[in-house]
């Protein structure tokens, strides 16, 4: 477990890193209002206004104005984290944001680690675990689709559905426990094990589990690797994609013959795009290293775009036959030649680009169960793991009932399922079980 | 100092408490309102039952008395829930009430270091700061000093009984309530609440038509409650089963307004698990019948107990609905059913040693702590007695945790969560019930009882003998075949048991029943027990993080206000206990963990 210190002042950019109308920088920690007040020139001092007030002013470094911005002050534990906090709404634009972010640590603050604001909110009782997680995902997610499902979580959609299953299982537990807590002669003689209820619960959980891959795709995104021989047109396609999809976040260049990486969004799916070194045998050590890394990227890719120039096609049957591969014939503006089974595309005219995007999107969604509009989708590995455990325990329950094992053993399986679901919806206590027994069964001599 | 320990009350808690103290060598006085009522089974004439039977065997394993008393006085024995699995099977015995009570008194009289005295305690002696108990004052003016006091007042503290419109100050029908003490405890800072319980009418056996009822006999084989002997021979007599009907329910519904419970006279909460017949009829309207057990109160009496018909309706209504039941048409009522309301002390004011947080050296046990049941009372009495002695010896208390005993579950629940209704033990309250079986109570507890100075050396030797037997039997099975398989492996199959195996492996018969049972369960449930052991380990890790007694809860930043208040009320002694307080948030436990760690 990573241990954070919680007694110092932290700051972080709260909005995405990029160009927008506004950028919000959040500062939290006891004493942060005092600290900022001394460098924030405004008509009312930050220290003198009441909690929740927005103050217009200038953030200054000595005589230099860094930015004219609005500071919203949170006092007496009303901030997001439950600590004193200030939110600076600055002008958008990377230069301004960078200037502010460089200035703040000179005051004695510390850049927040990932998730640290949520952790503080959690530690101060401002947020429970599922909400904390959803907020984290909200922050992490880079696309509109992902944001929509993350919001669904906050509204408690996921919890509602899982809670319904949990309540059913609690009833099953009740029918088992009543027989373990009361003697044969004190209960109705034949309480049948509610096999059907358990089966239905497994089905419901499976349906929720199945959305995990979809959730992961929209939340964490996909890796697309461009591959092909030297001069196959990879860089042209790469640049075209970056130009077409305006939501570029960053791009960086590796060593000359390594690979280039960029982020964009295709059909709502956040994508990490890799332009690799050309594949060919080489005696050049550096290039060999580049090719080795390309191979590594291939292994981790969700989609491989294999490019070939129809006038001089270099083919690779191993890659082309890979189920993740989409084959693209480039430079369709130069000649009319096609390659059979290849999509045709021109980076100069952009012809074929929409088809290519559709093909990529279709490939990424391949095998994913359809998720109807408005259905919640799970994204977190922890939630998935809990649901997996619950399902497994319920399947064991059914097996053990089938085998005729005694109820004291069966109850262990059900308990495990309840515990797993309880991690998502709140613990199931023995009092809950007894309450269930007393309200559903007339027991006691 | 007149005595080392004074025990107030001669019920099932008081018996265990005073015996534990006297046997450990402390000069002990038992003060009781009636020497004729020691060990009285005020309600149903049975000891044991699910989870409760485990408590009796745990009491015995620690060196207590209850197992021996019931073994010597039972008139029917049944092993319950055999079909539902060994972890929840449990012994229950019908008792001859009169023999049980007489034997209890005889046992106390024979005990060295123990005096019995009949009087009613009305006040506690304390030091000037009212922080430490120093003895008792009685109704007849006796002032008796002692180093420690164990309080076990049952239903007697400000007890009031109700039968329809009639109500009277009493702890049991015909026995005066203990007045005064409850008020004094309130003044001393105890949180005193009211609880309610009830009992059915007793009817005359010769007025029953047993041909119109089902007969319920005991098991052929009796498994003793006590680990000190392997088998007992007792003559068994039957119980009878009949059912209420629509007519019964109509009579009850027509008169429900005359019930002190529904009429609002009784304020104390009653137990949901043991509802009166009027509760059952009101709450489960769709049920067309409820089961009634007609149980003998003893061998030397005609009184029969109507289990399932507990009621506080007026006597003539009770008579009417009893007579509407098959087999009971001409029943002669000897004692009416009634409800009793009494004072109990909030168990949140107790440490897990059962010592009061309000008054040092005062230990509290039994119904006074909000529980219900003879077995629940006995085990607390025993622990209170043991811990009073350990305190006087300057030793640390014997605290059983939730993984070690149902007793541990019971006390931890009481002192951590408190209770709003009479608390009864259930197997589902125990997270680790596979390990808390009745058959291995000796393995779990006898050494601890011995270390506390209570369980005798013979008990320990008997335990070792059993352990050797279990080893030897497993060794035997390891080297034998059964149905073309290794016998030890074959035993794991659900349909195989040692009795079956004994038909082809003769030597199995040489082992005692207790060795055979223990071995069978060990082998059959090995996988599950191992799994549980892992959970036990995780549990113990949290228990090990101790919270100091003088911990300043206001200094921990980041705990929610509700949780902080709860922590301050319960004052948990470990992080594990803190995590079990109802309504405490997981996030607050995380904060607390972080705080305790650095």
Image: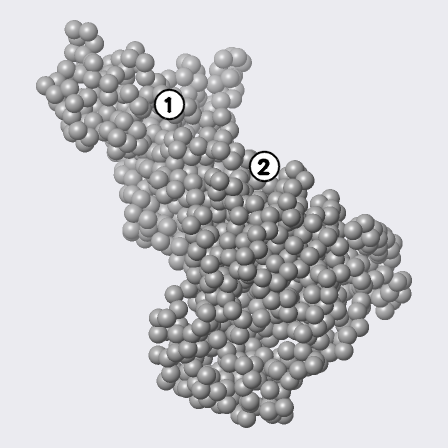
Q: Residue at x 60, y 48 (%)?
A: B145
Residue A51 image offset from top left, x and y in percent:
19, 30
Residue A321 image offset from top left, x and y in percent:
48, 38
Point out the frontmost of discs 2 and 1.
Answer: 2
**In the rendered image of this protein, does residue A296 appear above or below residue B335?**
above
Q: Chain of mark 1?
A: A
The reply to whether residue B496 is in sight is no
Q: Which mark is residue A258?
A: none
Q: Which residue is mark 1?
A: A7
Query: Seen from this angle, which residue lies furthest left?
Result: A43
Q: Chain of mark 2?
A: B
**In the rendered image of this protein, does residue B366 appear above or below residue B79?**
above
Q: Residues within 10 Å of mark 1 (few under 14, many from 20)?
A: few
**In the rendered image of this protein, does residue B204 appear above or below residue A65?**
below
Relative horizontal placement of residue B507, taking residue B143 as reference (left or right):
right
Task: Give A15 or B448, whichever is nearer the viewer.
Answer: B448
Q: Residue at x 39, y 36 (%)?
A: B559
Q: Quadrant of residue B231?
A: bottom right
Helix, strand or loop under label 2: loop
Residue B136 image offset from top left, x and y in percent:
56, 52
The reply to whether residue B172 is in sight is yes
Q: Quadrant of residue A226?
A: top left
Q: Which residue is mark 2?
A: B544
Q: Residue at x 70, y 48 (%)?
A: B26
Residue B192 image offset from top left, x and y in percent:
44, 55
Query: Seen from this angle, which residue lies furthest top?
Result: A63
Q: Quadrant of residue A366?
A: top left
Q: Residue at x 50, y 63 (%)?
A: B178
How far separated are the C-alphas under marks 2 and 1?
27 Å
Helix, strand or loop under label 1: loop
Quadrant of the image containing the N terminus of chain B: top right
Q: Are marks 2 and 1 on the same chain?
A: no
């Amino acid at each position: 477990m990573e241990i954070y210190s919680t007694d110092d002042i932290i700051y972080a950019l709260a909005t995405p890193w990029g160009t927008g109308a506004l950028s919000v920088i959040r500062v939290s920690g006891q004493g942060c209002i005092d600290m900022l007040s001394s460098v924030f020139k405004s008509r009312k001092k930050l220290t003198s206004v009441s909690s929740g007030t927005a103050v217009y002013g200038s953030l200054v470094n000595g005589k230099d104005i860094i930015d004219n911005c609005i500071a919203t002050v949170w006092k007496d534990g009303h901030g997001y984290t439950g600590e004193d906090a200030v939110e600076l709404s600055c002008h958008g634009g990377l230069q301004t944001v960078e200037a502010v972010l460089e200035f703040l640590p000179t005051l004695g603050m510390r850049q927040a680690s990932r998730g640290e604001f949520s952790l503080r909110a959690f530690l101060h009782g401002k947020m429970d675990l599922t909400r904390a997680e959803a907020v984290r995902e909200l922050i992490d997610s880079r696309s509109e689709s992902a944001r929509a499902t993350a919001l669904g979580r906050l509204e408690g959609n996921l919890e509602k559905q899982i809670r319904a299953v949990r309540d059913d299982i609690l009833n099953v537990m009740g029918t088992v426990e009543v027989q373990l807590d009361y003697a044969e002669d004190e209960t109705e003689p034949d309480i049948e094990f509610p096999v059907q209820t358990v089966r239905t619960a497994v089905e419901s959980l499976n349906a929720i589990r199945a959305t995990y891959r979809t959730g992961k795709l929209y939340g964490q995104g996909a890796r697309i690797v461009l591959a092909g021989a030297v001069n196959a047109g990879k860089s042209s396609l790469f640049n075209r994609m970056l130009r077409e999809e305006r939501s570029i976040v960053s791009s960086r260049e590796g060593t000359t013959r390594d690979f280039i990486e960029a982020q964009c969004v295709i059909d709502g799916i956040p994508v990490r795009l890799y332009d690799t070194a050309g594949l060919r045998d080489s005696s050049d050590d550096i290039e060999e290293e580049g090719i080795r890394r390309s191979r590594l990227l291939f292994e981790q890719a969700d989609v491989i775009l294999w490019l070939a120039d129809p006038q001089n096609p270099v083919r690779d049957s191993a890659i082309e036959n890979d189920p993740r591969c989409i084959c693209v014939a480039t430079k369709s503006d130069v000649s009319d030649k096609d390659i059979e089974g290849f999509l045709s595309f021109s980076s100069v005219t952009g012809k074929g680009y929409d088809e290519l995007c559709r093909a990529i999107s279709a490939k990424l969604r391949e095998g994913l169960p359809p998720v109807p509009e408005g259905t919640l989708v799970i994204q977190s590995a922890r939630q998935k793991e809990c649901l997996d455990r619950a399902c497994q325990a319920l399947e064991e329950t059914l097996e053990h009932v089938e085998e005729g094992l005694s109820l004291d053993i069966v109850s262990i399986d059900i308990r495990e399922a309840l515990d797993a679901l309880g991690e998502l919806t709140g613990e199931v206590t023995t009092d809950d079980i007894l309450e269930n027994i007393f309200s559903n069964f007339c027991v006691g001599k | 100092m007149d005595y080392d320990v004074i025990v107030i009350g001669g019920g099932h808690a008081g018996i265990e408490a005073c015996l534990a103290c006297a046997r450990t060598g402390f000069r002990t006085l038992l003060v009781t309102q009636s020497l004729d009522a020691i060990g009285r089974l005020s309600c149903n004439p049975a000891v044991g039952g699910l989870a409760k039977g485990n408590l009796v065997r745990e009491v015995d394993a620690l060196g207590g008395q209850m197992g021996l008393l019931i073994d010597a006085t039972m008139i029917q024995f049944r092993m319950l829930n055999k079909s539902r699995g060994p972890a929840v099977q449990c012994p229950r015995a019908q008792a001859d009430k009169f023999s049980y009570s007489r034997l209890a008194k005889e046992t106390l009289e024979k005990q060295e270091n123990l005096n019995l005295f009949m009087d009613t305690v009305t006040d506690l002696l304390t030091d000037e700061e009212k922080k430490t108990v120093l003895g008792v004052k009685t109704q007849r003016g006796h002032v008796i000093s002692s180093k420690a006091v164990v309080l076990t007042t049952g239903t007697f503290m400000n007890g009031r009984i109700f039968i329809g419109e009639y109500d009277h100050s009493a702890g049991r029908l015909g026995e005066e309530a203990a007045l005064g003490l409850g008020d004094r405890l309130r003044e001393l800072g105890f949180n005193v609440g009211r609880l309610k319980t009830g009992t059915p009418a007793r009817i005359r056996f010769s007025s029953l038509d047993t041909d119109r009822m089902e007969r319920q006999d005991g098991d052929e084989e009796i498994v003793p409650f006590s680990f000190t002997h392997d088998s007992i021979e007792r003559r068994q007599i039957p119980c009878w089963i009949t059912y209420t009907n629509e007519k019964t329910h109509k009579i009850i519904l027509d008169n429900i307004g005359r019930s002190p419970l529904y009429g609002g006279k009784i304020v104390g909460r009653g137990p949901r698990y043991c509802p009166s017949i009027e509760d059952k009829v009101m709450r489960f309207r769709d049920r067309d019948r409820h089961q009634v057990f007609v149980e003998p109160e003893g061998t030397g009496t005609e009184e029969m107990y109507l289990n399932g018909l507990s009621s506080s309706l007026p006597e003539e209504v009770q008579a009417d609905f009893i007579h509407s039941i098959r087999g009971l048409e001409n029943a002669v009522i000897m004692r009416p059913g009634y409800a009793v309301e009494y004072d109990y002390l909030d168990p949140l004011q107790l440490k897990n040693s059962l010592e009061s947080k309000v008054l040092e050296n005062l230990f509290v046990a039994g119904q006074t702590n909000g529980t219900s049941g003879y077995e629940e009372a006995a085990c607390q009495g025993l622990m209170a007695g043991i811990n009073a002695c350990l305190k006087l010896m300057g030793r640390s208390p014997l605290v059983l945790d939730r993984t070690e005993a149902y007793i541990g579950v019971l006390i931890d629940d009481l002192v951590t969560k408190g209770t709003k209704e009479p608390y009864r033990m259930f197997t589902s309250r125990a997270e680790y019930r596979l390990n808390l079986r009745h058959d291995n109570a000796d393995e779990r507890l006898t050494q601890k009882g011995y270390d506390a100075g209570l369980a005798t050396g013979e008990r320990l030797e008997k335990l070792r003998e059993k352990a050797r037997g279990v080893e030897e039997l497993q060794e035997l099975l390891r080297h034998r075949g059964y149905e073309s398989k290794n016998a030890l492996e074959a035993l794991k199959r659900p349909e195989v048991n040692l009795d079956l195996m004994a038909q082809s492996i003769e030597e199995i018969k040489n082992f005692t029943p207790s060795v055979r049972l223990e071995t069978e369960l060990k082998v059959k449930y090995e996988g599950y027990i191992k799994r549980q052991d892992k959970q036990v380990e995780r549990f113990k890790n949290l228990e090990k993080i101790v919270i100091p007694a003088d911990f300043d809860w206001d200094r921990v930043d980041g705990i929610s206000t509700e949780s902080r208040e709860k922590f301050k009320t319960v004052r948990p002694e470990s992080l594990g206990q803190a995590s079990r307080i109802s309504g405490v948030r997981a996030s607050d436990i995380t904060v607390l963990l972080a705080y305790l760690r650095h």
